[in-house]
Amino acid sequence: MAAQDHTTHDNIPGFAARRAAFALVQGVLARKETLADQLAAAHGPLQGLEPSQRARAQSLATGTLRHLTRLDAALAPFLERPPPPAVLSVLRLATHEMLVDGVPPHAAVDGAVHLARAGRKTGRFTKLVNAVARRVSQTDAKAFAEMPPAALPSWLAKPVIRSFGEEAAQAMAQAHGQTPPVDLCVRDGTPETWAERLGADLLPTGALRLSPRSALSSLDGYADGAWWVQDAAAQCPVALLGDVRGARVLDLCAAPGGKTLQLAALGAQVTALDLSGARLERVRENLDRTGLQAQLVEADARTWTPDAPFDAVLLDAPCSATGTLRRHPDLPFVRPAPDLTNLLALQADLIDRAFDCLRPGGTLVYATCSLLPREGERQVADALARLPGLARAPWALPQGWEAGWRTAEGDLRLRPDYWPDLGGMDGFFAARLMRMRKDG
């Protein structure tokens, strides 16, 4: 949007959030920048916005990307020819506001006109935006909601169908088309109490689930660090380590720190290692808020050597993040058909280094938020063949976990289509391994 036009429109209700949402969407579609990278940028689209405006902009941009296929289908009957990409983004945002968010048509249409008028690339299309948005406002929101969601990208659908079947792939696509809830992990082990205080649902695994909302920082317990945001599936790998009270535990690739907080809350002596100092700062902030303690190390896990071996290592390895598309709908637009070559090599190196950091008899949990077996089941099978001292370690099914989550090989496999009546979960893979004793 044209910087010189900001002062003309900034006093219009909702304009600042719409402008920021437009910039985020364009960053993804035109410049192939992830939402996370844009949000973290020093001079990103949300800079200078009030918390409520930031939350609204992020929600609108994320929702527009999540429903892009359906939004384009709703717009198609009213467009004789495709408008310029920036104009289409303005129309998509307005359509999302009316058909998904339930914003009154007059407000959404007026907002779209102001948004178009403020931009160098969109200003001369104001009449088109006004006419099309008004026609879209006549669309039945219920009929829109019943449109089929976008199918999984072909590069993801093929391995998913091969591994889990066509029905599962369709169910995952359906899950990706739903706005995900907000999951919380409770610090002090009393989720029942906090479920009542926050009006949250208590999930079978002990996680709390809230309907999507803004201003989490205003909720009871946030300032005191009584809980933190973490998907229910992402909370599960820590449970595979078992009782960690007093144990020396290394959290490799620790940022943004949810698992570090879990381990510290369970009484472990945690060393949280990450390559990024900026991402570790987020871990430090969360530790300070929750009053938990961990040693933070900024280093490359492939070259770092500990002073002494650890009792346990949790490796949540960098991956394709295909299990988190429901929360990060921008990824398919930014990273179509990811090249796994370097990622697979990095994951293997990290498993080897995690093994080296373990004492004999120590436990290693390898995890990825990926739906691709090459990053999960096959990666573990290769590690077991490569490292003679590495073996699978048995684990008991924790309370609330379903038997179907355990694979035939004894690993944990979670999918977005699980818990459909509860709001779904992220896709995750985790394996509990151990370093055999020398006399073993």
Image (cartoon, helix red, strand yellow):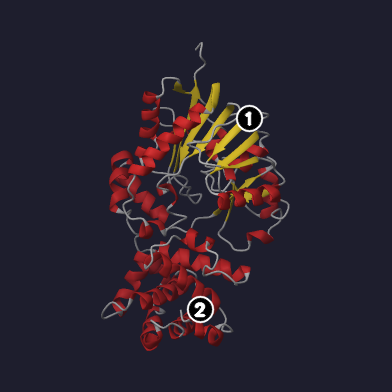
Mark seen at residue 248: 1
The percent position of residue 46, horizontal first and vertical second, equals: 55, 69
The percent position of residue 370, horizontal first and vertical second, equals: 41, 44
Would residue 35 appear left or right of 56 to someone viewing this image? left
Mark seen at residue 104: 2
Dot 1 lies on which element? strand
In the image, what residue type sits under mark 2?
Pro
The percent position of residue 362, horizontal first and vertical second, equals: 55, 24
- Residue toward you, 83 or 171: 83
Would residue 21 appear left or right of 381 to someone viewing this image? right
Q: Is residue 226 visible?
A: no
Count residues near mark 1 (Cα–Cα under 10 Å), then give few for <14, some for 14-19, many for 20+.
some
Count residues near mark 2 (Cα–Cα under 10 Å), then give few for <14, some for 14-19, many for 20+.
few
Give me the residue at 48% from left, 59% from top. 37
How far apart, in angstroms, are the residues tagged by discs 2 and 1?
55 Å
Is the residue 60 above or below the residue 166 in the image? below
Give me the residue at 69% from left, 54% from top. 222
- Residue toward you, 207 or 234: 234
Would residue 197 appear left or right of 156 to someone viewing this image? right
